[in-house]
Amino acid sequence: MMRYFQPEFHIVRDPARCIHCGCCVRQCANECHYFDEDGKTVLCRDESCVSCQRCVCLCPTGALRIEKFKSDYRESAVWTQQVQKEICRQASTGGTLLSAMGNPKPYPIYWDHMLLNASQVTNPSIDPLREPMEIRTFLGRKPDRLSFTKDKKLLTEMPPQIKLETPILFSAMSFGSISLNAHRALSAAAKELGTLFNTGEGGLHPDLHDMGQYAVVQVASGRFGVHKDYLNNSAFIEIKIGQGAKPGIGGHLPGEKVNVEVSNARMIPVGSDAISPAPHHDIYSIEDLRQLIWSLKEVTEGKKPVCVKIAAVHNCAAIVSGVARAGADIIAIDGFRGGTGAAPTRIRDNVGIPIELALASADQRLRDEGIRSRVSLLAAGPTRNAADVVKAIALGADAVYIASAALIAIGCHMCQTCNTGRCNWGIATQREDLTRRLNPEIAKERLVNLVTAWNHEIKEMLGGMGINSLDSLRGNRLMLRGIGLTEKELSVLGIRHAGE
Amino acid sequence: MKKVIAKENLCLNCRLCEVYCKTAHSKSKDPLRAYLNEPELQSRITVCGDNQKSVAVQCRHCDNPKCVEACITGAMQKDPVTGVVTCDAEKCIGCMTCLAVCPFGCIKIGETAVKCDLCQGEEEPACVKNCPNRALVYLEMGGKADA
């Protein structure tokens, strides 16, 4: 059949360097590399290359390089190659375009338009290598006031608090969308780092039962894997209302990914599609949400904080306020650049708003209403480095969720094709020959290294600002200045422009 | 003694251990030059199987090596101190008796017998050092160093 569009990528094999060892042939699940009839000479074809970089990274002689397939169309700012390719793809399949990971479009990234302050002369900066620096974070509802007995004993009953050694948590990724080895690595890293990982909507695999205390267990619209023991074997519970990558859309784990292990964790039959509806069918109002929050609190005897995760959408400040009043202890807001294992391309690329704006407006709204201390705010989708984390905290977040960065640390190259289930790095797949490629021990070490490095950098930046505790930065927007932003953007972010 | 242990649940079938084994035993120690200029080079480690199930196989440096027992020239020896079984290319006549008796099929024949020497002199064997998924580990396994 004639194809109406060209491949995305072109594989360049340097004949002077290729030793025909065949490593690339055996490592490409997309079958781009293959042996000639002689069984010795390695050849390649471009059609199914997704530029996951697996072959490039493993080639022992550096003989491989992936470049964009270049065949120039007549220039048009309207009908770009990408636009035309998408049309042709739909014309040949009749289907919704699917893609994965976060919104890749060049919308403004506000993190890059905010600058941090540093101390000069009038207040001393602090050297984190010589002086203590506190980045320990507590999540959960804080009481409005504390009362004590005369002999200084606390009278106020403290709501359950989650103690984290870093303001960074691993965000929701279900077992099913990612491999068990990836879950093993995330849970072990969370344990070592004194933070938490999130089960997504996939339940907890029996092998990871002992890691429950480091898990945020998710209750989403499909209710997969949810039972009393699951809820109680957790750090806290998260009700997922929406996801930044696909607000308003449910989830669909195709039946071919539901093997025995996934089926056990999700409590569904092997091979059946795991479909999470777009809405929770028992939540049509804030009052309904309140009921679910309180039934979860009841089943855990009030020992577990309940978090509600919403996607950053137009009205999110008001929604956050409603969710806080419904009894949530923690609210996670997921920005439109957040990742996903699969989303309709049009939704991923066009729905939702940036986390920076959503976070700033939600924090402001809660403060204006005097209920900010009732909830902890988690920002997600995405924070790319320690500076983003610091800026998120200055904008009002209590902590941040990272997922894309965590996956990149363990091999992901953002090829954005998780939905195909052919992840060459063994992350977003259930194929046994591929999941084996992710050694949980190596992956754990890399995750621990990443977050440890970010912790160091966070402390450096705090020290530079003359702050020795993350709590003093939380919501401290005077530490931020905008650059290249309009008056409106500055006012939504609640920050001044550089030089002001 | 320390031995190379293969973990088949982590083996990728990438066969880079073979590439780096050849390189480590080449004159140039460079993969390109090894493959281009020394076509007679053989890998002393072999990955058996396919992407569904694979494992790297190499000399087990047995406590009582059959190959040493069977060697008619005394080329095959187990070092009494390190326990490493090596073949002295000067003495080997390529009779293949060792190959016939090796219970693991870990000896290859070129002009002489070719087998794993655990990259003596290096901190760890090249296959272990370069395995991208730590499917090969170099562990103290006990056992006799003395043949």
Image (spheres, coloured by chain):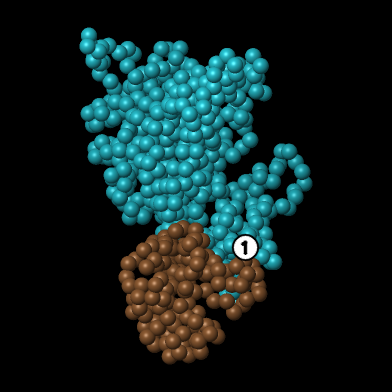
Chain colours: A cyan, B brown
Residue at the (37%, 26%) spot, across then down? A138
Q: Is residue A439 above or below residue A87?
A: below
Q: Is residue A409 above or below residue A479?
A: below
Residue A385 is situated, as x and y percent measured from the top left of the image, at 54, 35
Residue A282 is situated, as x and y percent measured from the top left of the image, at 33, 31
Residue at the (28%, 45%) spot, across then down? A209
A22, A69: nearer the viewer: A22
- Quarter of the image that includes the N terminus of chain A: bottom right
Residue A72 is situated, as x and y percent measured from the top left of the image, at 75, 50
Q: Is residue A45 left or right of residue A142?
A: right
* Amino acid tagged 1: Thr
- Quarter of the image that includes the C terminus of chain A: top right
Residue at the (36%, 72%) spot, across then down? B145
B55, A280: nearer the viewer: B55
- The chain ID associated with circle 1 is A
Residue A278 is situated, as x and y percent measured from the top left of the image, at 42, 36
The picture quadrant where one finds residue B55 is bottom left
Look at the image and tell me whether residue A311 can be seen.
no
Task: Estimate how packed mark 1 is, as few (under 14), some (14 to 19) or many (20 or more) residues with alpha carbons within 10 Å.
Answer: some
Residue at image mark 1: A61
Q: Residue furthest front?
A: B81
Q: Is residue A293 above or below residue A17?
A: above
